[in-house]
Amino acid sequence: MRIGETATVTVTGFEPRNVLVQLDGPGPAGRIPHSEMFDAAGTATIGQTFEAEIISLDPIMLSARACANPATRAFLLSLRRGQIISGTVTSVRTFGVFVALDGEPTESETGFIQVPELTWSHISSTTEVVEPGQRVTGEILDIDTRRAQVSVSLKALQPDPFIPYATRVGETLTGPVTKVVPFGSFIRIGPGIEAMLRGTEPYPIGTELTVTIAEVDLQRHRITVDLPLDSHPEA
């Protein structure tokens, strides 16, 4: 018995937040949280039998909703992380984008792109990048059978704009202040690239500053800059 495997379970009882089940005939007892049943109310009847996915071994916990749609589950299990996949945008929301992936069962809409995975550039709205009906191609980051969702990244297939800056430490650049925070200011030093200027007086947004690249952290995608002593910002 392993996490991710399925088991035939029979309902034996109820707890305030769980449905009690017996696995595969005389197998061990387990629990299915109401949130992991076919509906949030945890509706079931004593003696009812169905398939569920094992999500924990100690204690034994299962998910019925992970097996609610066999066709969708089969599609999800055919995918792998890192795979390149295409689909059609079905809905654009402020928190992300829903995508009908190629090959999925009709009306499943399993693809989802979080806002940070749309592009390397800073955007104020998801509609700046995609719109309903648009075809997109991205890399699979994760596959969640319980939520019937595939996390996709468009950004993963785009060139990382931070990489060229790794060899530019010490170089002086000029750009506008884009944001002011308690610990410093952000300066746009290139298309889609904002660097942190720490510990200086707050300059009005839009002020042009000449700065020197002090550090480039490719893992965190952060660039730190310093303000030269002889720099005179222009309002």
Image (tube, rainbow, N blue to C red):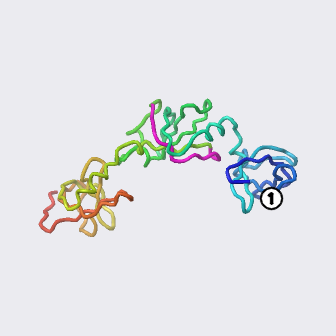
Of all residues shown, which one is farthest toward the front? Answer: 1
Q: Which SS class for mark 1? A: loop
At horizontal 26% and vertical 54% (from top left) the residue drawn is: 165
Up the image or down, 217 lies above or below 104; here it is below
Q: Position of residue 158 (x, y in %)?
A: 37, 43
Q: Position of residue 201 (x, y in %)?
A: 24, 68
Q: Nearer the viewer, residue 44 or 190?
A: 190
Provide the residue span drawn in magenta.
135-147
| 227 in magenta | no
- Could you classify mark 1 by the number of other residues whose Cα lies within 10 Å: few (under 14), some (14-19), or many (20 or more)? few
Q: Is residue 94 left or right of residue 162?
A: right
At horizontal 48% and vertical 39% (from top left) the residue drawn is: 84
Q: Which residue lies under the disc numbered 1? A: 15
Viewport quadrant of the C terminus:
bottom left
**Count of numbered labels shown in the rendering:** 1
Up the image or down, 213 lies above or below 139; here it is below
To which quarter of the image does residue 145 belong? top right
At horizontal 20% and vertical 62% (from top left) the residue drawn is: 170
Up the image or down, 167 lies above or below 151; here it is below
Q: Is residue 138 left or right of residue 231?
A: right
Q: Position of residue 82 (x, y in %)?
A: 50, 45
Q: Is residue 50 left or right of residue 105?
A: right
Q: Position of residue 234 (x, y in %)?
A: 14, 57
Q: Nearer the viewer, residue 160 or 228?
A: 160
To which quarter of the image does residue 200 belong? bottom left
- Main SS of the magenta part reads strand
Viewport quadrant of the N terminus:
bottom right
Which amino acid, mark 1? Glu
At horizontal 45% and vertical 31% (from top left) the residue drawn is: 135
